[in-house]
Amino acid sequence: ENQAPVLSSCFSPDGSTVFTGGCDKAVRMWSLGAAAPPNNVPQQIGVHDAPVKNVAFLPSTNLVVSGGWDKFLKFWDARQPNPVGTLELPERCYDLDVKGNLMVVACAGRHIVAYDVQGQPREHMRKESPLKFQSRCIAAFPDMTGFAVGSIEGRVGIHYIQKVQGKESFAFKCHRQDANVFPVNSICFHNFGTFSTVGGDGVVNFWDKDNKQRLKGFTSINKSISCANFNARGDMFAYASSYDWSKGSGSYAPGTSNEILVHYVAEDEIKPKAKRSGIKR
């Protein structure tokens, strides 16, 4: 149904519906299971003037938010043809994430904007990324006190929006092999408050931000990992290997297989441990 590559997808909280956005500029809704239409054709619920980079579901209002390269956030009610709200971004949307009432958006030009999405969405904070290079991904903390942002320079920034006693913002290096530096392509948080990063080096890492330590490092699959996420229960971790375009079109190898891998997560792999040595900054 999509006329161009899909760049983002998300589930509704009950898992009955999937929303997608991509390079054909459309936001679509796919009903699953018994609710699926006989021909399984998705419903287009929104459109941008440029490719849709990200979509997410807002559980507090039952709306879908989409961020586009047209520098706009749009909020959609599947029952209405027009957006119920529109917010202008400082630059193109590169990634966004929603946890509870907090939405964080990473834009081109290293802009980061945080919104309170309880009720009518409103801007809560706008700042420059704590990292020196282009933002690649962003994820909100499960407790909504801050966010983690990853850059093309193999570095993650942990930033607190709210003051948390004993906690300070910091940054650390990751996804590097000797003198080679790889982009951090995706960050996702587990229910425990720990998180994963995946990168262009084909490596998955599990981290504990509070104790500033790596919990687990996977062996490289020798292909870039473009995206990843935990399931709702946190006992499965899915990640996709495909070319991430970090080296441009000249390094693209047509015919290279794209794969989705699933790792069953043991609790001791992802649960915070007693503090050991700190993350190398």
Image (spheres, grey):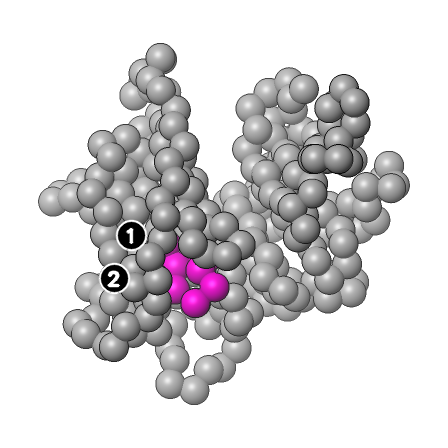
> Which residue is tagged 2?
214
| Residue 207, horizontal then vertical, whole percent | 31, 61
Horizontally, residue 168 falls left or right of residue 108, namely left
Please state, as top left, top right, bottom left or bottom right, where the C terminus lies in the image: bottom left
- Main secondary structure found in the magenta portion: loop
* Left or right: where 65 falls relative to 153: right
Residue at disc 2, secondary structure: strand
Q: On the rendered image, what quadrant is the N terminus found in?
A: top right
Q: Residue at x 76, y 54 (%)?
A: 62
Residue that extends furthest to the bottom in the rendered view of this protein:
165
At label 2, the amino acid type is: Arg
Residue type, mark 1 in image:
Asn
The verdict on residue 190 being magenta is yes
Side of 118 where 179 appears, left or right: left
Does residue 269 lie above or below 262 as drawn? below
- Name the secondary structure under disc 1: strand
Q: Circle 1 is placed at which residue position?
A: 205
How far apart marks 1 and 2 lie (CA) works out to: 7 Å
Tell me which corner region of the image, top left, top right, bottom left or bottom right, holds residue 279.
bottom left
Instruction: Please name whichever residue, 36 or 114, is drawn nearer the observer in this view of the structure.
Output: 36
Residue 101: x percent and y percent? Answer: 65, 66
Q: Which residues are magenta?
A: 189-196
Residue in front for this viewpoint, 136 or 45: 45
Q: Earlier in the sequence, mark 1 or mark 2?
A: 1
Badge 1: how crowded within 10 Å, few (<14), some, or many (20+)? Answer: some
- Residue shown at the point (64%, 35%) measured from the top left: 20
Can I make out residue 36 in this image? yes
The answer to whether the residue labelled 1 contacts the one labelled 2, judged by CB atoms less than 8 Å apart, is yes
* Residue 107 can be seen in this image: no
Is 148 colored magenta in this rendering?
Answer: no
Residue 1, compared with residue 271, is above or below; it is above
